[in-house]
Amino acid sequence: MTTRPGTTTREPRTTRHHWWGRQPIGSLFALPYLVFVLAIFAYPLGFAVWIAFHDYFFTAPGVEVPKPFVGLDNFVTVLQDPQVLESFRNIGVFLVINVPLTVVLSMVLANALNAGIRWAAAYRVAFYVPYLTASVSLVGVWLLLFSSGGLVNAVLGPLAPDPSWLVSSSLAMPTIALYVTWKQLGFYILLYLAALQNVPRELHESAETDGANAWQRFLNVTVPGVRSTTVLVLVLAIITGANLFTEPYLLTNGGGPDGASVTPVLLIYQRGIQQQNPDTAAAIGMLLVIVVGVLSLAANRINRER
Amino acid sequence: MRTTRRQPGTWVRYLLLTLAAAVFAFPFWFMVVGAFQESPTNTPGQLLPTSGWTLGNFAAIDSRIDLLGSLLNSLVFTAGVLLGTVTFGLLAGYAMARLDFRGRGATWVLMLLVQMVPFQLLMIPLYVQITRGFGLGDTYLGMILPFAINTTAVFIFTQFFRALPQEMFEAARIDGASELRIVRSIAVPLVRPALTTVVLVTFIGPWNEFLWPFLITKDATLQPLAVSLANYISNVAQSTANPNGAILAGATTLAFPVVVLFVLFQRYFTASNIGSAVKG
């Protein structure tokens, strides 16, 4: 019935195959989704780029004021702003802590879960309940646990840091990184669990007959076997790190202390909506996307090398 | 020989997993216990309280943020997203999987691109567009609109309909059924397992979302619980004598529906394979 591509016989197709397809009603079915994507993604995306290159400001409704093209001015303003630079540095601190912890812990825990152990389902649920739960809820809990007189400091006793976790400029960002690692880990464990199913069992068996112990097999069979998932985990962790908003907003009271945990998205909110400078805010957004893109490409290289 | 060498490895494995599970579950224990305690403890020795139980924390937070109203707003927000995603996502997914129409390839490319567009870039233009362009600031519709059709859900529907046998649809067409009728009498009745997955995946998005409803709602009576709880934590708590219990009560209320939903539907989640669906 169906003609294979490359065959020259086309008489069965011409009778029913029209320019608009065999079931043109399909475009009607897909239309609401298409309109949604155009209105909520495509148009704002173009608008964001347009705002970033213009002197854009909010006016009273109905008032038309020229918004001149200013080239790269907004980007120059943003790049000379020490707070913006600090926010990108903070993201760097976040990634340096969050990414290795996430990759190592999720790979090790997924590997431990995969070995056909008892109560695997219960362990799995424990791991991904934080991922499913609202960040606002969990931030509230961490806020109390890590406060100056909180449980964590009570356990640490004389070892408790002073100033405490969330009010120390050197510990605020690492605490956020720790929180996000904890919150997201369950999702990454799931990704690795799925990937582990595709590592051929024979590879493990032949490594075992060669005398490799469990640790050596993990390093030489499992880790290379799930490399493409590791790249995915890296990219997703980078995106999550670049998107931080709720955590610095609530956990460190708006990026404190002294901007030590301020993030680009927090600045987009403050500049764009609180201080009514959507043009510089849009420029921060574009810079952020470029940084994320470059980092993701770098992560992708890991997959291609070796 | 083999078993003796395996034994220590297994032991380490259980120790590791149990330790990790404890670290993962502990904040939840702290949250739920603290929510029902007169004064949530900061002393490690009192983590298993035997007295001091109270519902006062829920009353305390309710007196400041209207707990029930916020829950209702969360529900409207989430229900709106679910409704949009299930109706339009199902239609789009069915069309992508089973219908041959002009623009199908382009739609598929769009679906892939949407997954790559970061929300932080869209935040400012969407805010301008929805509050100023559409005048939808402080409305449920404005809250729902950016999440109205979850693209991941469209993918799930597409994969599901693709896996159904082609003959079912061909037979209906030969019998002269219209495409709309095929959707109604074949696609929709079979979609249950995919629907469960879609509802779970979609639900946690709007229910947990903070940033967008926070931007778009100034009116406290419209704020979903995630936003009003965040307001309580960042503004009200400082001026309250003993806010810890109230924060934990609010956190428990916000977390509870998702955890319950997930625990209830977990078996559907794993059993949602096409084989069982086709067999009935």
Image: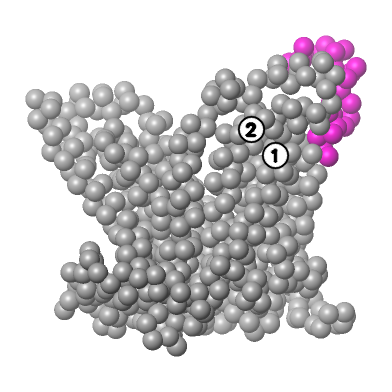
Of badges 1 and 2, the one in the foreground is 2
B144 lies left or right of A22: left
Question: Identity of the amino acid at label 1?
Answer: Leu
Dot 2 lies on which element? loop
Residue under the image location 22 percent in, 66 percent down: B50
Q: Nearer the viewer, residue B56 or A106?
A: B56
Q: What residue is shown with label 2?
A: B191
Q: What residue is shown with label 1?
A: B90
Q: Real-space Cα distance between discs 1 and 2?
A: 9 Å
Q: Chain for mark 2? A: B
Residue A100 lies within the magenta run: no
The coloring applied to the image is one colour
| Label 2 Cα neighbours within 10 Å, binned few <14 / some 14-19 / many ≥20 | some
> What secondary structure do most residues of the magenta stretch adopt?
loop
Decide: marks 1, 2 in contact (CB < 8 A)? yes
Marks 1 and 2 share the same chain: yes
Residue under the image location 59 percent in, 79 percent down: A270
Dot 1 lies on which element? helix
| Residue B58 placement (x, y as % from top left) | 44, 71
Residue range highlighted in magenta: A1-28
Residue under the image location 19 percent in, 47 percent down: B15
Residue A1 position by quadrant: top right
Say above or below: A194 vs A62: above
| Residue B88 placement (x, y as % from top left) | 73, 44
A165 lies left or right of B176: left
Q: Nearer the viewer, residue B173 or A171?
A: B173
A25 lies left or right of A178: right
